[in-house]
Amino acid sequence: MSALRRKLLRDLIRLWPQALAIALVLATGVGTMVLANGAYLSLFETRATYYENSRFADIFATATRAPKDVAADIARMDGVAIAEPRITALALADLPGVAEPASVMMISIPDNGPQRLNRVVLRKGAMPGPGSFDEVLISESFAKANGFEPGAQFDVLLNGVSRSLKVAGWALSPEYVYTIGPGELMPDERRFGVVWMPERELAAAYNLNGAFSSLLVKLVPGSSESKIIEGIDTALKAYGGQGAFGRKYQTSHAFLDAELLQLKAMSLILPPIFLLVSAFLVNMTLSRLIALEQEQIGLLKALGYSSWAVARHYLEFVTVIAILGTLIGMALGAWLGSGLAELYARFYRFPSLVFARDLQTYAIAAAAALTAALAGALQSTISAARLPPAIAMAPPLPARYHKLVTGLFDVARIFPQSTLINLRHLAHWPWRTAGAILGVALAVAVLVGSLWSFGSIRYLIDVTFNRSDRQEASIYFPTAKPMAAAFSVARLPGVLKVEPFRSIAVEMSFGSKKRRVALTGRPVGTSLSQVLDVNLKPVPLPGEGVVLSKALAGILGAARGDIVEVKLLEGESKTISLPVSSIVEGYFGLSAYMEINALNAKLGEDAAISGVNLDIDSSQRAELYAQLKQMPSTRFVTFQKIAMQKFRSTMAENIYTMLSVYISFAAIIAFGVVYNFARISLSEQGREMASLRVLGFTRAEVSALLITELAIVVLLAQPLGWIVGYGFAQAMASAFETELYRIPAIVGREVYAYASIVVCLAAGVSALIVRRRVDRLDMVAVLKTRE
Amino acid sequence: MLNGRPEAGVASGPVLRTRGLCKTYRTGEVEVQALRNVDFEARPGEFIVILGPSGSGKSTFLNIAGGLDSATSGEAWFEDHSLTQASEAQLTRYRRDHVGFIFQFYNLMPTLTALENVRLVTEIARKPMRPEEALALVGLEDRMDHFPAQLSGGEQQRVAIARAIAKQPALLLCDEPTGALDSKTGIRVLEALALVNERIGTTTLVITHNAAIREIAHRVIYFANGSIARSETNTVRKAPSEVSW
Ligand SMILES: Nc1ncnc2c1ncn2[C@@H]1O[C@H](COP(=O)(O)OP(=O)(O)OP(=O)(O)O)[C@@H](O)[C@H]1O
Ligand SMILES: [Mg+2]
């Protein structure tokens, strides 16, 4: 090994804590990149493979009752590869271990021959036999949550008739990778499941012999989805068609899309931040290392080493660190990736997960890490290469300190002499002081940028469940009913209060933008479920016009006063124009509201309601639930409290897991920056400190000098960190926003406080480590050699 | 260019030559004339001692002669190659192939051992001696694996000499090599310099504040106020061991 390489090695060993600190920060960048990209690809590939193997449909349509001939006609349309008619129906279920009414989605499976689209994967047991009766397949998660082994039985209300179904086997379907019940915010495996039943039985139960209520369509690759949707809508118009839609609006698919979107956002936002910080750290460390080695560099040049050889020496130093960081980051990313995959397995029901180990991701991550490190090294390496060799000949120059700005100097008189040394030192290298402040500020910012979400989620839960939707339960009817239905619910045991609502599927458009949403009608002055404006004040629904949630208004680009077109997707299909009367808050989905009578008037209907929101007397809950389970006029029931708990526990698992990763990364950054700064200050001031010790200063006095400097930098960095962190929080919130939900970027004071505490702790630990080194400072050695 | 060193007896011209060499330092408003019209020649194998008061321009002159610094005006040649016209890369080659430096403050790499410090040079030189051999010449064969911090000042300086002579340079430039040493150690260092000068015919320039040392030189140059005030040739040279201070 050449002598220069040997110096490199010794430098690395000598500076290992600093080198490792930089490598770890780099590793966080590489790690998040590998993690996010790997998870994205894995999920994407898993989904694609599953969709392919199970022949997931492209278009979905429902009708009240359409003859099978219509499906055959649709199958013959240009661009349609397969059109598979089937029967689907939502049914109430009475489950042995579940107090509340549960619901199941009944789906028919063909009597002769296999399913052609949305094929199920059998996970346990067997398909119902050819001559079976009341035998069904149930979705795996539902089976597990309720402990339904093959052979188990449970009751459902099929078209008003109670039936006891026997579990033949467990299955998975591409349609329910994310199995969320109707009207729910979060999956609840106990209370919602999918049940596959032979078509002959389901048809008999719902009087749909020779007919279908749901249609799956597979397109010929390259054909126009919108054109075929139009064709299907026309074909099903006479049979109660409710508007066909593509995968985009298929619930499970949309949730997967949202997850993919967030992963993409994560891979685009976080790694650059971490890499930026590492580049900065490399810059800080290297430029100061080079400043310390000036004479050695001069010497190398005096000995005949070229500028390039000198530059290469330091580039190699950085490259070794970059490689180390990349390797740690890759291991970290792969490890976290498998953890994430496990997390996915809990939320998303795939028959198997494909682990995409994409070389390109690793290559890009490595290249990014190296680029960041080299970019950080660039400026200092160039200045190293430019150092004149004569510097080796000169005796060590005492640094020329300036009086601080004259005014400041007078102020400085009131400080003890040691603080004056600190201030002079900080002012003498303004750039490196600014750099250190910026570095510490970035650490604070990264922490603020990840810690905010805890409070925001709490806020979101509070707004959604305690202020906006305060009802305990909501009952949805199978079809719109007259207002009288609300009164009959009110007479049920334990019902304290009833508020009706109307909900109708519409396609809302403004200009070229359009979206399928549920348009909800409510009476004025409801107290259970209310619409809140952006200041969280209840909004009285206007007599005319429609109220849009912020997210929907944003997507459509519609503002207050604009006229939106609303196409009804249920019942009589027609399009109405409505003025936007206000924009309101709302974190889940895209929503639109109208005053219920105004809505009914527009629909051309008498007072009709789709369901009711309830307040319940808890002492009579059991009785109420028992009656609801048997009520044919109930399509499904949702429970806000359960939803809230589910939301909390799911978030706890999902977001909090991710967050703990970011927070540890942020802590690493904080420590890396502060520690490096402290160490470099120490080596810069080593001689000065040893001299002070010689003069009779105590160890404590000497380390206080260093620690005070550190403290000044850390303190000055806080406000800047808060500001930048607020920016990070906003960027994260908007990047993580999807059409399904968004998390408000609420950055509470405690977030700033926590971030600052973590950074100050990191600073404290660094200070202690450095302090120990000061204690061991060898006066003789420092003064003897000229470093 | 700047390749090929004079074979013994073949080269008759000067190894180092300067004409009207000037160097001006400018720091803000203040101008310092460090060198004023220095004319100088050093013949192959000559041992020259440079004396002069502090600030008289000795180091500045040596730095330019060694290709470490550039002149403001005037010319300098190594053999028939101009140093004042040379590019950065050519100066690097010049230092690598022909010049050995010894500094007052030893300037060893603190993270390399004595042997490795010498190797730093032998690895890139064209016709080096073995690093062990160079260290043996200065009497440090049994301290080869010590780091600078584990050596005394005189030992560090001898490592620096070993490093400078290991490439068998045409020119050895020493800036106060004994400045930080006691007389006994200083003499050991001078002996090593004289030995190299004799054995491999290296032209040697030694700056010193110690007038006693002038007696071991072929020639003594006196710097004053940025130029050469006078020059005298010793008819009789003393061996380093005969000098005392
Ligand atoms: N980098 C510099 N900037 C400004 N002036 C300089 C610089 N280097 C040297 N000088 C000035 O040039 C003059 C000559 O300096 P030089 O170092 O050559 O003196 P010297 O003869 O070696 O002195 P000493 O015996 O003290 O080492 C001095 O006045 C010095 O102050
Ligand atoms: Mg000098």
Image (tube, helix red, strand yellow):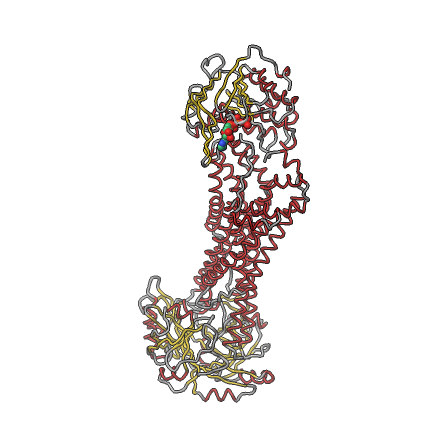
Q: Quadrant of the C terminus of chain A?
A: top right
A538 vs A659: above or below = below
List x then y, in percent, for residue A198: 47, 75
Task: Find residue A683 and report its image quarter.
Answer: top right
Task: Find residue B213 and report its image quarter.
Answer: top right
> Looking at this view, is A427 or A232 the one in front?
A427
List x then y, in percent, for residue B135: 61, 24
Circle count? 0
> Looking at this view, is A634 or B20 the one in front?
B20
User: From this viewpoint, is residue A304 visible?
Assistant: no
List x then y, in percent, for residue A412: 57, 49
List x then y, in percent, for residue A727: 47, 59
User: From this viewpoint, is residue A719 visible?
Assistant: yes
> Looking at this view, is B137 or A62 the one in front?
B137
Q: In this image, A765 relative to A364: left or right?
A: right
Q: Quadrant of the N terminus of chain A?
A: top right
Residue furthest out toward the top:
B235
A83 vs B162: above or below = below
Q: Residue at x 46, y 39 (%)?
A: A382
Q: In this image, A93 relative to A234: left or right?
A: right
B150 vs A629: above or below = above
> Looking at this view, is A87 or A630 the one in front?
A630
